[in-house]
Image: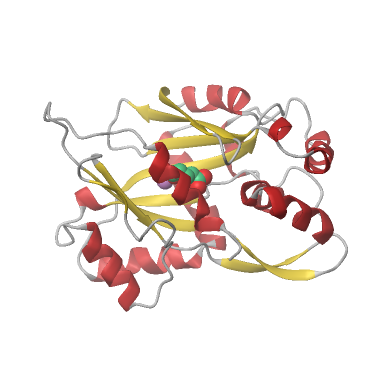
């Protein structure tokens, strides 16, 4: 699959449940800006037919290669990042949940979801907008997962899809600082992720990031109960030059740990 088709399809699926992203893109366009993506991200279950290991070859088939690995102890996650030799294509951040580190009741709920996924489900890059490959969870199971892992609860309802796109602030013309981007969004009434402060990272770390809080949809659980739950969010990243003159092009665990919270329920 052509990378251009991959990203346009992902974007259409993403804005369908993240209308704020389309509105914010239009907001930048109204300021005469062209929006270019720094990276996108996916979440998945480890030790499943859609594990990171099983998904990676589909990224490689489009010319992507892994160049960094990350671990999030408290969130029970590992992640890898991927880039393309065409540096204008977005980087990709792919994380997976280490289900065996969760309490037994959560392991059982997730094992039931994973059991619903065909072993050979990963056949082409279109798997990255497959969404839920299992039955709709019950509200009770959702809340049990939520108690121990916001990520698990989000993934159980949303499934495999781009959970955020990221505007490259470096490639904007008139918004130079991340603070000016945040102010624009606050003025327009968007709710930003405040975990650890509006700006994650710093120029000393060569990466500054901020994000909106995810949009919400009314979700009908398997038992018929309807509840508003988070969908996906939009991120903004500004990269800085390292002492060798190159732009930092990886990710930072301390920043990412807080970006994950953009899909928190509260
Ligand atoms: C990914 C969070 C990490 C970043 O830029 O550090 C991330 C997620 O929310 O799935 O995107
Ligand atoms: Ni991100």
Q: Please indicate whether residue 197 sits to the left or right of residue 80 in the image.
A: left
Q: Looking at the figure, which quarter contains the C terminus?
A: bottom right
Residue at image location 19% in from the left, 66% down from the top: 32
State whether residue 117 appears in this view.
yes
Q: Quadrant of residue 83?
A: top left
Q: Quadrant of residue 129?
A: top right
Q: Nearer the viewer, residue 140 or 26?
A: 140
Q: Nearer the viewer, residue 8 or 150?
A: 150
Q: Please indicate whether residue 90 sits to the left or right of residue 5 in the image.
A: left
Q: Is residue 19 above or below residue 102?
A: below
* Rendered location of residue 173, percent (x, y): 15, 57
Q: How many marks?
A: 0
Residue at the right extreme of this rendering:
223
* Rendered location of residue 139, percent (x, y): 80, 61
Q: Is residue 157 above or below residue 64?
A: below
* Rendered location of residue 199, percent (x, y): 32, 56
Tell me the colour scheme of the image: secondary structure
Q: Quadrant of residue 177?
A: bottom left
Q: Please indicate whether residue 44 sits to the left or right of residue 93 in the image.
A: right
Q: Please indicate whether residue 262 sits to the left or right of residue 221 in the image.
A: left
State whether residue 232 appears in this view.
no
* Rendered location of residue 102, percent (x, y): 72, 38
Residue at image location 70% in from the left, 26% down from the top: 47
């Amino acid at each position: 699959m052509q990378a251009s088709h991959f990203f346009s399809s992902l974007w259409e699926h993403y804005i369908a449940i993240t209308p704020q992203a389309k509105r914010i893109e239009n907001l930048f366009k109204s300021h005469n800006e062209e929006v270019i993506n720094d990276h996108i991200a996916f979440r998945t279950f480890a030790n499943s037919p859609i594990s990171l290991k099983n998904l990676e070859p589909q990224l490689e088939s489009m010319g992507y290669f892994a160049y960094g690995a990350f671990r999030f102890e408290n969130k029970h996650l590992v992640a890898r990042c991927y880039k393309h030799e065409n540096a204008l294509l977005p980087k990709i951040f792919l994380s997976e949940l280490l289900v065996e580190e969760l309490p037994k009741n959560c392991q059982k709920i997730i094992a039931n979801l994973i059991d619903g996924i065909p072993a050979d489900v990963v056949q082409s890059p279109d798997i990255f907008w497959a969404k839920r490959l299992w039955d709709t969870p019950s509200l009770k199971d959702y809340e049990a997962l939520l108690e121990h892992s916001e990520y698990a609860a989000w993934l159980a309802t949303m499934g495999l899809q781009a959970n955020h796109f990221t505007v490259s602030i470096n490639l904007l013309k008139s918004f130079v600082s991340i603070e000016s981007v945040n102010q624009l969004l606050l003025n327009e009434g968007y709710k930003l992720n405040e975990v650890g402060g509006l700006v994650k990272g710093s120029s000393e770390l060569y990466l500054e990031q901020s994000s909106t809080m995810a949009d919400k949809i009314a979700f009908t659980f398997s038992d018929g109960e309807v509840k508003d739950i988070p969908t996906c969010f939009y991120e903004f990243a500004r990269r800085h030059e390292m002492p060798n003159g190159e732009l930092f092009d990886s990710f930072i665990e301390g920043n990412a740990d807080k970006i994950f919270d953009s899909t928190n329920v509260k």
